Image: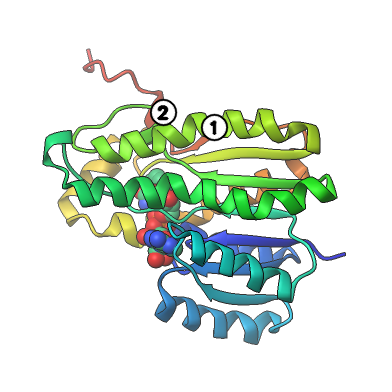
Amino acid sequence: MTNTVVITGASSGMGLSATKLFLKNGWNVVMADYDETSGKKVESELVQKYSADRVFFHKTDVSSSESVIDLKNATFKKFHSVQSIINNAGIFVKGAVHEVEERDWNRIMNVDVKSIYLMTREFVPSMIEQRQGTIVNTASISGLMGDYNMASYNAAKGAVVNLVRSMALDYGKYNIRVNNVNPGPTNTPMFQKNPAEVIKKFEDASPLHKLTEPEDVARVIYFLASSESESITGENIPVSGGFEIYSGQPVQ
Ligand code: NAD
């Protein structure tokens, strides 16, 4: 039987890299994303390469209950079972707490955190039934540590960092593993929105003096979703070039 994975945020960045890697490794892929223009364009390229039997795009707002239910229905109409979901869609909001607009606070909590609840609520019952499945969430090193001017993002990703532990505890008895990948600054459209001088600062601050590439993250997502990581569950796995290992003390 061919494995099937549902990947959110699949039109761009890490989700797109993960989509290509799962397809290359023989999985069926459901690409879920809000961005229909990019999603449809990528879908047609991938259908040409792998056939419409293996991949399709479904316009999805991961923060909407109706939209995630619609994604589930479209997924099970096409594929008989789902072995893995990748909760990767996310947004970034800048600012200290008092600078964040209420609508932006709600938006980031809905897209980066509530989406995991909605996706799990809709897809985990079939995994429980089949007594098998994996869930991978894209958290961030910004959930493990604090950052300047990233209060709502730190709060959202911090929630994901602990949510993975309760999910792993609750679903372990059904042979469902749940893990987070925690990227550092990664060379995707989300990060490329920064001015060149800011990107340079991040490169200089990295122990490896470079940004993480989306393909680096995709390989770890794939590892955590596949049977290669059989005994790993409830973990946060940084893929950051070592960004989060530094205490912040000045160089002597
Ligand atoms: P990206 O902006 O390139 O891709 C994110 C995708 O999510 C986009 O295609 C976007 O359309 C989609 N999306 C946004 N809101 C959505 C919604 N409501 N419903 C469905 N899709 C939605 O960004 P990326 O860097 O690939 O980010 C992927 C994940 O990695 C995010 O969760 C992000 O927070 C996290 N992350 C990014 C970095 C980084 O430096 N780029 C670092 C750590 C963690």
Q: Quadrant of ligand 1?
A: bottom left
Q: Quadrant of the N terminus?
A: bottom right
Q: Is residue 228 above or below residue 97?
A: below
- Left-right relation of 151 to 112: left
Instruction: Give the residue number, with chain letter if any, for mark 1.
Output: 236
**Ligand 1 within 8 angstroms of badge 1 C-beta:** no
Q: Is residue 12 shown to the viewer in this render?
A: yes
Q: Residue placed at 66% from the left, 43% from the top?
A: 224
Instruction: Give the residue number, with chain letter if any, for mark 2.
Output: 144
Q: Residue placed at 66% from the left, 75% from the top?
A: 55
Inspect the image, locate mark 1, and give the three-letter code of the amino acid beneath it: Asn
Where residue 130 sits in the image (x, y, percent)? 84, 50
Mark pair 1, 2: CA separation: 9 Å
Q: Quadrant of the C terminus?
A: top left
Marked residue nearer the N-terminal end (1 or 2): 2
Q: Residue placed at 57% from the left, 53% from the top?
A: 119
Q: Residues within 10 Å of mark 1 (few under 14, many from 20)?
A: many
**Quick check: marks 1 and 2 in contact, CB under 8 Å?**
yes
Where residue 126 sits in the image (x, y, percent)? 76, 54
- Left-right relation of 105 to 167: left
